Image (spheres, rainbow, N blue to C red):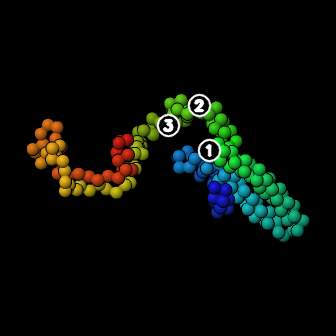
Amino acid sequence: GLMTGILATVMVQSSSTSTSIVVGLVGASQIKVRDAIPIIMGSNIGTSVTNTIVSLGQVGDPVDLQRAFAGATVHDMFNLLSVMVLLPIELISQAIDGEGGPLYWISNAVSTALMGAVSPDDMFESPIKQITAPAAELVLHNDKYIINVLSLAPLRARTPNATNVSSCGPSLSSVSAGQKDCSRYFCVNAVMDKNFKKI
């Protein structure tokens, strides 16, 4: 996690960008908060590369270069020392508790205090969302489960080679009460079945 944050920040040269990506992934339930903490710490270390590059812009004047590099080093050492102190405490507490360490507990307490209870019904409702929702409904109405189903492979009708004749009628025209037409069926995988049930 730590190296992921460092490399992502070094590549985009912006800890705000890499942190925003991590926040988006946590919000979309792609990664857990406890897994995001080392990535965020890594993004803070990654900014050390950026400020060191900026300090090298003073290369024309040795005195200014020394001052700029000293300022960048103060920033680097603050970030490195913070991670060296907090990350082991977080990881050891997480290993003992199984859920998270002090930073996880603090972030959980703050988010619960500001946003409300864990239940989606009790969550804070954004006033901007309330204002824009009617207009957005006129333009766009999406269902993520339908989008998931559409992104999967198309269904193909298949002819069964062995069926339970007591529960299946021979054809659609001769299906009696309580019997199903089993002349054609569709195979769906577990993901598709889960999404179909939610529709």
Q: Amino acid at mark 1?
A: Gly
From this viewpoint, which residue is outermost toward the front? 96
Disc assigned to residue 132: 3
Q: Where 57 falls versus 129 (above or below)? A: below
Q: How many angstroms separate mark 2 from mark 1 (CA)?
A: 24 Å
How far across and how far down the image is residue 102, in percent? 70, 42
- From this viewpoint, is residue 127 visible? no
CB of mark 1 within 8 Å of CB of mark 3? no
Mark 1: secondary structure: loop
Mark 2: secondary structure: loop
Q: Nearer the viewer, mark 2 or mark 3?
A: 2
Q: Amino acid at mark 3?
A: Thr
> In this view of the protein, which residue sits in the foreground, 35 or 66?
35
Mark closer to the chain start, 2 or 1: 1
Q: Amino acid at mark 2?
A: Gly
Mark closer to the chain start, 1 or 3: 1
How far across and how far down the image is residue 149, in percent? 36, 50
Q: Quadrant of the C terminus?
A: top left
> In this view of the protein, which residue sits in the foreground, 148 or 60?
148
Residue occupying image coordinates x 51% and y 33%: 120
How far across and how far down the image is residue 50, in percent? 73, 61
Disc assigned to residue 116: 2
How far across and how far down the image is residue 103, in percent? 69, 43
Q: How many marks?
A: 3
* 56 sits left or right of 172 in the view: right
- From this viewpoint, is residue 59 visible? yes
Disc assigned to residue 98: 1
Mark 3: secondary structure: helix
> In this view of the protein, which residue sits in the foreground, 70 or 164?
164
Few, some or many C-alpha atoms within 10 Å of disc 1 (few <14, some 14-19, many ≥20)? few
Residue occupying image coordinates x 58% and y 47%: 32
Q: Nearer the viewer, mark 2 or mark 1?
A: 1
